[in-house]
Image (cartoon, coloured by chain):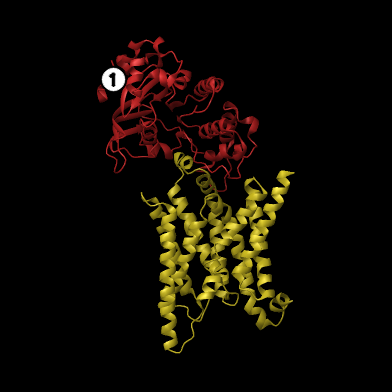
Amino acid sequence: MRTIEYLFGPPELAALFWPAVVVGLLVSVLCAVLSPLVVLRRMSFIGQGVSHAAFAGVGLAMVLGLGAGTGGDWGILIVVALACVVSAVGIAALSDRKGLNADTAIGIVLVTAMALGFVMIQHAAEAMRARDEAPGFGVESVLFGSVLGVRWGDVVAAGVVVAVELSLLWWFRRGLLFWAFDEVGAVSVGVRTGLVRTLLLVMLALAIVVTMRLAGVVLATALLVLPGATALRCSSRLWPVFGISAVAGVAGVSIGLVVSFELDWQPGPAIVLTQVAGYAIVRAVSAVVRSG
Amino acid sequence: MTESHEPTREGGAAIEFDRVGFAYDGAGKPVLEEISLRVEPGERLGILGPNGAGKTTLVRIALGLLAPTSGGVRVFGRTPAQARAAGWLGYVPQRTGAELAFPLSVRQVVEMPTLVGLRPWAAPGPEAREAVEYALGVTGCGEFCDRPIGRISGGQLQRAMIARALASRPRLLVLDEPTVGIDAVGQKQFSTMLEEIRRGLGVTVVVVTHDLRTIAAGCDRVACLHRTLHAHGSPEGLTPGVLAEVFRHEVEGVFGAVHVDAHRAEECHDPSHAHGAEGDGHAHD
């Protein structure tokens, strides 16, 4: 099996694959814990808008000459994180304006980010070729993720983001849950809903940043949607839903990475298809149980 | 817990609207004009008016969810935002915007306000737990409190939302169209519940409705609203003339068999309740 060979074979080979596995496990837990909130608040399209903003961030980082050739470079991560956070806050601000609904706001941000990102990546790649330098990564790996593109620097970034976000989620859990359940009700008892919403959007943006290296900007949002959707089919109790979501997230990423190694697929599609299969199975089983 | 027992100003009103006006951006005609109204602590006030009269807008201004275009509002002597932050307000909207697919039991929903403002590691104290039990009991939610919030009937959901509003032990409870779709038996139960809540908590209650039966079922005083305040006094003072002015069409067509003509018209013009006449000049005669 390639999986065993890659992870437990020669140290120089294992050193290439372990960062992707560790990042995968870290982000799967974080995304799975955020996922029920994303699903219940119908924020998956916001996630799409934010993750596509990461594409523009990558383009900007390449134009600025940051991180080319070094996947785990902090410079590129910071530029991409800024692009995602600005787009998340921008979507929220645009959605609040009268005459522009959230779907339209997200659609505008999404296509603008993709167009800008593509132009900037193409421009940077041509400039690098003119200097006889190889681009650090191709458009395909940005869009769909790459196992070998994940470095130990990404592990550190993911570890920090996951630790900070899980702490913030625990700290603000009561306000977040009240806001997510009933915004008007939460406002009426003094919950600072603007702060809570912005906090969640920033957390989503940063979760997408640390996920996109592995799963790609197009598919990173799947990790924020599928575990929660699966868990909500299994339980109607609060904490079990979050627990099941975490299990579904970790299982989906683990199995997806094995599929990626064995079939030589890119990790993004392998993880997403595994999680979709899990969701389909749970949905079918729950339909049978409910009809019985 | 958000409950606070800070004293209000001496002789302060529960709510005091002072020449309040409101218009939505770009809308030609204001929704509210020159509304002056004083609600006393412990009172049960009904705000009666047809759909689109500005009732919900008025209570949302009192709750600090909307800012008036003109005039001002004080709630227990504070701004609405301060009153809200102090946990003095309980609000049950007409249509809950709650996400009912949320995996929460009725009890967890009712407990929510008691958790706001607690330190993340702190559990609710005995007073908060008692308030939750009281709210579940007085609204009759105890029997289904362990069921998921998305799997209860509309009437049960309404009671759960009232229980949630009560759980923070508010000083002011605002109910927006609380009896929509509830039959005569439900109206009677609602009336009993409102009286029990007032006796138990001494809370000021504002009920917003277009349904006269809701006013008759449990309000001490009624304010008739249709953009401006037309009259306010005891429910017995509501005459067909007042109602026709407020609703602008046949009273019988709206209320069917309700015998509004049995009430005494003069009570509507009790000078102690003639605030609308002073404030807007629209008091009906």
- Point out the image quarter for the C terminus of chain B: top left
Residue at 62% in and 52% down = A242
Q: Which picture quadrant has residue B23?
A: top left
Q: Above or below — where is A117 with respect to B259?
A: below
Q: Is residue A81 above or below residue A172?
A: below
Q: Chain of mark 1?
A: B
The yellow-coloured chain is labelled A
Q: Which chain's colour is red? A: B
Q: Amino acid at mark 1?
A: Ala
Task: Give the percent coordinates (x, y) of residue B271.
Answer: 29, 15
Which residue is tagged 1? B283
Left or right of B241? Residue A60 is right
Q: Is residue B33 left or right of residue A246?
A: left
Rendered view: A285 above or below B108: below
**x, y percent for residue B139:** 57, 27
Q: Would you say residue A247 is visible in this rendering?
A: no
The residue depicted at 53 percent of the width and 23 percent of the height is B190
Determine whether, in the image, residue B149 is placed left or right of residue A259.
Answer: left
